[in-house]
Image: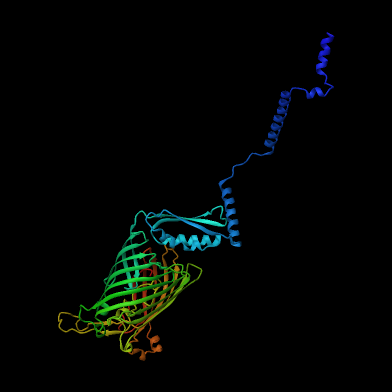
Amino acid sequence: MENSVEEKQARTLPNPNPDQDERQDPSDAKEDENDVVDDDEEEDEDEVEEQEPPSKPVSREAQLRAHKSKMDDLFRRMQNEKVNLRVHDVLIKGNTKTKEWIIEAELEGLKSATTLQGLLEAAGIANARLQQLDIFDSVRVTLDSGPPELPGTANVIVEVVETNNPLSGECGAYMKTTARSWTVEGSLKYKNWFGYGDVWDGSVAYGPNQTSEVSAGVFLPRFKGLLTPVLVRVSLLSQDWQEFSSYKERLLGLSLGLLSTRHHDLVYNLGWRTLTDPSKMSSRSVRRQLGHSLLSSLKYTFKIDRRNSPVRPIKGYAFVSTTQVGGLAPDHRSLRFLRQELDLRYAVPFGFYHAALNFGISGGVIFPWGCGFLDKPSPLPERFFLGGDFSPICTLGGPTTVWGFKTRGLGPTEPRRLIKDKPNDENSDFPGRDFLGGDLAVTAFADLSFDLPIKWLRDRGIHGHIFAGAGNLAKLTENEFRNFSFHKFLESFRSSVGVGIVVPTKLFRLEGNFYYIVKHHEHDRGKTGFRFSFSAPS
């Protein structure tokens, strides 16, 4: 019994010799160490779990706010600092038919950019220019980082989607400068036929006074390295002016657009014009110009329009200057003349009921040139004719309209030839007069537009207006300029006032107006009364 108790005490008492601990089995020591490490890791994990609170899901609104904050910081930095960056390469994708150099020509601004700000601006301009070609359904310009070995560079990726249906058609009402009247026009276009960005179109137009025009043309955005597009058009124009001036006009012409930018336009016109008088009653001045003539002219137009709307301007201004030189051909039948038009518009907002005052002044002069030009008349179709119910707010481009007067309803006139071999014609003794137009024309107008008190009308853009207008014509050719007097010219101005309602549409501007003729001359065709009129933006 004593031996067993001693053995138990020996097993339970600590060993006084530490060497015996060092000699214990290494496997047992490793197990003890592992147990200690596992315990420590479990304790650490417990502490971490106790320290980290449960994460809450971030809402989409918070993500958007954070993204907006980052973008604002980026834009603020871009505004305050210039980030140097240049384009390393431009990659074009998606053009299966369009020639690559056509697209590259619209991306020239990208290669010259030296900063990130400049590159973003150039990318926006390139995107807009590619969209204006009207041969792509969509255009996407992406900026990507350049090669890692070339810091400070970027790659531009341009992805285009060519139109699936190259054939399209449209219909609308337009102001024709050649016809000097509004026309309803329908056209068909075929886009990118040969892959050069070319747009082929054919159109048919019809308007008042039996005005008709058939034309076909092609538009080329790039041709032989030229920096501006080229437009070639062939047209056949027919107009009937027998009611006003006892002649019919037929013009077969070719126009070549040489320069076309945002503010500048240069066109060369070549045409063969024929004037006829089926009634045989035209006045002496008209008969002198009947027959064939050659029109070879260069026309330059400078236009700037900063108005907020061409149909109902509330603020802004517009200015148009047109210079035309005719007679650029050695043929003796070529019409030689110089023609200049100026048109200025300004809109002043009042700040209530969308009220605005639009006023404008237009002027034009034409004069022949060449040997003996002082004794020669100006070409009859190129003269200025005033009248018609077109709104001067829409018709931007020279003196044309005086409210309340009919088309070609004022200016110099001459009696028609009297034919006495028509006994059954009741008006044979009163053949009427031909309106001959003028070499100098000046018009001015003021128009106060305002919203109507009915909400249904305001929501649809229907508004009222009060207006006043004046204009006059004078002859300067055939030595008449020697008798010209500014005082008499101002005294002989025709004028009118009125009030009406305007209904704007997508195609034209419809007006119902009451006109009151304030001043007119003996043979003018002006009448006080209520009439409807249609006008299309020029």
**Count of numbered labels shown in the rendering:** 0
Kindly indicate the quadrant of the structure image that contains residue 96: bottom left
Side of 171 relative to 343 (left or right): left
Kindly indicate the quadrant of the structure image that contains residue 430: bottom left
* Residue at the extreme bottom: 482
Colour scheme of this structure image? rainbow
User: From the viewer's perspective, is residue 366 above or below residue 225?
Assistant: below
Q: Position of residue 483 (x, y in %)?
A: 36, 91
Q: Position of residue 94 (x, y in %)?
A: 41, 53
Nearest to the observer: residue 289 or residue 136: 136
Nearest to the observer: residue 227 or residue 212: 227
User: From the viewer's perspective, is residue 505 above or below residue 396?
Assistant: above
Q: Can residue 282 be seen by looking at this rendering?
A: yes
Q: Can residue 404 be seen by looking at this rendering?
A: no
* Residue at the extreme top: 1
User: Which residue appears at 39% of the width and 68% of the height?
Assistant: 502
Nearest to the observer: residue 463 or residue 91: 91
Side of 285 relative to 130 (left or right): left
Q: Position of residue 190 (x, y in %)?
A: 33, 60
In the rendered view of the protein, which quadrant contains the C terminus? bottom left
Q: Position of residue 162 (x, y in %)?
A: 39, 55
User: From the viewer's perspective, is residue 215 above or below residue 277?
Assistant: above
Kindly indicate the quadrant of the structure image that contains residue 175: bottom left
In the rendered view of the protein, which quadrant contains the N terminus? top right
